[in-house]
Amino acid sequence: MIISKIKNLIFLTLFSFSAPLPLFAGNLFLKSYGHSSFLIEGGGKSVLLNPFKSIGCASGLEEPKNSKVDFVLASSRLADEGYYSFNKLFFVDPGSYRINNIYLNGISIPHDRVKGRRFGMATVWIWEQNDFKIVHMGGAAGDINITNEILLSRPDILFISIGGGIKSYNGVEASKIVKQLNPKAIIPVHFLKSSEKKENCDFSDSEEFLENMGETNIKFVDKEFVIGKNDLKKMTIYFVD
């Protein structure tokens, strides 16, 4: 398998932490809940992305229940990426918003390959946190137009689905988007490990994406990890354990 070959060819930087990681200026702390859900802390703010109900491809995962976040961003109101179960500011509709010193921009991109006629439109989020430009495309499956490409281009961190299925980018589509946007750090979501199988889940593994990303640098990280400015010198794919 491609990942196994890569592990034998490159030096892997592994992160294992039993306690919360220290945050310094110019760093972001990230915690993965699985599927497309992450907690991001930095710049004095805590953001939760795509909280889910443990069903479908998210079955077997512990549902995010972090009550200390400042606000929640969701790709849609579908239960696997917009399950809102606690009393926090919740953003799911496209538009421009300001939360203290954070500006949020949500744009609509089809959630399927038929211009949203099956699953509607997903909201792709763009914001800056602790001087990082972050783009979350966990719910997108459609093409991006030139206007959206300009808004989304050159992020420091890009979350993007890669596992295919009926409402996520597959490996070929995701690699095309990555090459359009030219991010510094890529965090793939919505895929299964090669040895993993789930009922009622149409995700594939990461092999097709990696085949189409060529010699891009890779890091394998634990569910809790830090990205600093010094980590953004070369495009890197972050695979969360």
Image (cartoon, helix red, strand yellow):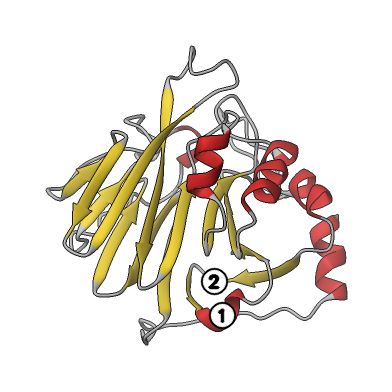
The image shows residue 121, relative to residue 210, as above or below, that is above
User: In the shown orientation, is residue 91 left or right of residue 182?
Assistant: left
Q: Which residue is mark 2?
A: 222
Quick one: 105 or 19, which is closer to the camera?
Answer: 105
Whether residue 165 is visible:
yes
| 232 w.r.t. 108: above or below | below
* First reached walking from the N terminus: tag 1 or tag 2: 1
Image position of 106 with respect to 118: above or below: below
Which image quadrant for residue 163?
Answer: top right
Residue sitting at 42 percent across and 20 percent down?
120
Q: What's under tag 1, amino acid-wise?
A: Phe
Snapshot quadrant of residue 69: bottom left
Quarter of the image with the N terminus is bottom right
Say whether marks 1 and 2 touch (CB < 8 Å).
yes
Q: Which amino acid type is shown beneath numbered disc 2? A: Asp
What is the number of the mark on residue 164?
Answer: none
Which quadrant does the C terminus fall into? bottom right
| Residue that carries the numbered disc 1 in the rendered image | 15
Q: 185 or 225, which lies in front?
A: 185
Circle 1: element type: loop
Q: Is 57 placed left or right of 72 in the picture?
A: right
Q: Position of residue 61 (x, y in %)?
A: 43, 49
Mark 1 residue crowding within 10 angstroms, few (<14) / some (14–19) / many (20+)? some
